[in-house]
Image (cartoon, helix red, strand yellow):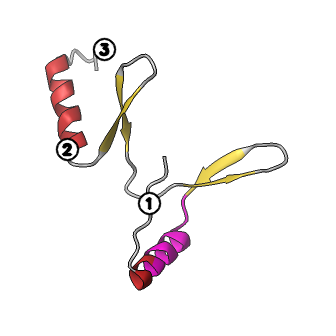
Amino acid sequence: MKQKGIHIGLTAVYRALSAADAEGRLESVHACSGAKAYRYLLPVHEYHLGCRVCGVGTAFFCQVLEDRVAQLGSRHGFEAARAL
């Protein structure tokens, strides 16, 4: 943006971050240093698979799992917890 001559002040950035946080699109986290950081919350769950032998892991999305989790939750009155 700077290369295109567009300047955005810090006040505008923090205002946008606060609004997105209030709308539930971001999650604020505190680093060990005490600094505040934000993490974008995906509208869908991200699943993780990891190898128990070598430790390699991968993240993925699966609509079939999403549908099944929603179905089970609805049937039993539960809601899936967001994993961090």
Residue type, numbered disc 1 = Ala
Residue 39 vertical position relative to residue 53 in the rendered view, above or below = above
Q: Position of residue 43 (x, y in %)?
A: 37, 56
Left/right of residue 57 with respect to residue 63 in the rendered view: right
What residue is shown at x 54% (from left), y 71% (from top)? 65
Picture quarter containing residue 81?
bottom left
Reading the chain from its start, which is encountered first: label 3 or label 2? 3
Instruction: Kindly indicate whether the residue at mark 2 contacts the one at mark 3 (C-beta within 8 angstroms).
Output: no
The residue that disc 1 covers is: 81
Residue type, numbered disc 2 = Ala
SS for callout 2: helix
Which mark's residue is nearer the viewer, 3 or 2? 2
Q: CA distance from mark 1 to mark 2?
A: 19 Å
Reading the chain from its start, which is encountered first: label 1 or label 3? 3
Which mark's residue is nearer the viewer, 1 or 2? 1
Residue at the farthest right position: 53
Count of marks placed on residues: 3
Residue 48 vertical position relative to residue 63 in the rendered view, above or below = above
* Mark drawn on residue 3: 3
Dot 3: within a 10 Å radius of its alpha carbon, few (fewer than 14), some, or many (20 or more) residues?
A: few
Q: Position of residue 34 (x, y in %)?
A: 38, 19
Left/right of residue 3 with respect to residue 16 in the rendered view: right
Residue type, numbered disc 3 = Gln
Instruction: Kindly indicate whether the residue at mark 3 contacts the one at mark 1 (C-beta within 8 angstroms).
Output: no
Could you tell me if residue 18 is visible in this image? yes
User: From which residue to which does the magenta span run?
Assistant: 61-72
Dot 2: within a 10 Å radius of its alpha carbon, few (fewer than 14), some, or many (20 or more) residues?
A: few
